[in-house]
Amino acid sequence: MTKHLIKHEISITKEISFCRRLVFTPKFYLALLVSQVVILAVFVYPRNFQNYDPLLVITDQRFQEELFNRTTENCSIWNSTELEPDTKCPIISPYLVGYRKPIISTAINWGDTLEKYQTVRCGGHFRPSNCKARQKVALLIPFRDRYAHLKIFMNHIHPFLMRQQLDYGIYLIDLDDKIMFNRGLLLNIGFLEASQEYDYDCYIFHDVDLLPENDYNLYRCSDLPRHMSVAIDKFNYKLPYDAIFGGVSAMTKDQIYFVNGFSNKFSGWGGEDDDMYNRLKFHHMTVMRSMEDVSRYKMLKHEQSAPNPKRFNLISTGMKRVKEDGVKDLRYEVLKKIYYPLYTYIKITI
Ligand code: BGC
Ligand code: MN
């Protein structure tokens, strides 16, 4: 019995001394280093790699060609011979799934996307076949050069809007390259163009880099203007300030005309949404927002554009110009209007 115990003790002592020796050998440290590198390579690197994905930040001619090579010459939205069901769609669509992680992948194949969304009509129109949608919604996207974002956005937004059983159309409004980007102007023109095409109930102003994460965030208008991108990942899913009206917002035709749309004077980045907030306040309208756990968005990465230094002055003097600076009497020229399979592209100049 004691002999056995002594033997056991000896083997333990041997093991301890082996471990001690091991800790002092260079091989041990080498093995430690190699294992760390393996852990980094397998778990950490791919996540960071995704963040630095060049396709999320570049302007790529190849995408432009890929996206532009299928167009439809004669594209009518819905003609009167195509009967719409009489029954209204349910208040809450039965197809909603709630939170769904947006797929941000460069591997999205444009051909597959087109194949998947064959029920979308030329120009990016859709309506449910089994019921009458509760609202007709135009998505207006001010656009310049963000083709990599566009591909991800289209792949995400079509099934999202379909699940909400909406009668919708998607419009990309692009500005003459010689003119500095102007979000407010593009949204005003998008509104005028879309309303000439179809009797929309609701207009949603939508940045191309924002992906809604939860389809209970219903893309509809209310009695008062709505600010929809309440919680964006870039701002840690918190509202940056109370008066924000940028990103994604929704207004009816009457609400837009009531405040004379956006100002056309905000060239470059920033301020046009703050000015719109002031217009709403000036006309005694309050802004509605949904709960932040539903109104969540993922923002696609891009370089921050240079803010317009004149925006503060424009904002502070804005209410003097409400009557003459807006959507009424706006003069512009349509340079191109193309019905692509998943959206209508309108390029304008002033
Ligand atoms: C700008 C807004 C913008 C907001 C959030 C503000 O400083 O004036 O146009 O929406 O920041 O980025
Ligand atoms: Mn952005």
Image (tube, rainbow, N blue to C red):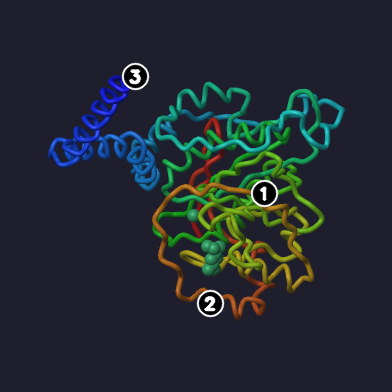
Where residue 212 sits, quadrant-wise, is top right
Residue at which label 2 appears: 312
Tell me the amino acid under the disc marked 3: Met
Whether the residues at callouts 1 and 2 have beta carbons within 8 Å, the answer is: no
Q: Answer with left or right where residue 4 lies relative to residue 312.
A: left
Query: How far is the residue under mark 2 from the one under mark 3?
Result: 90 Å
- Above or below 48: residue 236: below
Question: Mark 1 or mark 2: which comes first in sequence?
Answer: 1
Does the rendering let one see residue 60? no
> Is the residue at mark 3 in contact range of ligand 2, meaning its CB lies under 8 Å from it?
no
Mark 3 falls on what kind of element? Answer: loop
Question: Mark 3 or mark 1: which comes first in sequence?
Answer: 3
Where residue 137 sits, quadrant-wise, is top right
Tell me the amino acid under the disc marked 1: Asp
Residue at which label 3 appears: 1
Mark 1 falls on what kind of element? Answer: loop
Residue at which label 1 appears: 293
Residue 146 % position (x, y):
43, 46
Tell me the amino acid under the disc marked 2: Phe
Question: Mark 2 or mark 3: which comes first in sequence?
Answer: 3
Query: How far is the residue under mark 1 from the one under mark 2?
Result: 31 Å
Residue 344 % position (x, y):
56, 39
Q: Residue at x 39, y 40 (%)?
A: 47
Is 302 or 221 nearer to us in this picture?
Answer: 302
Residue 105 % position (x, y):
43, 35
Density class for disc 1 (Cα within 10 Å; few <14, some 14-19, many ≥20) is some
Q: Residue at x 72, y 36 (%)?
A: 166
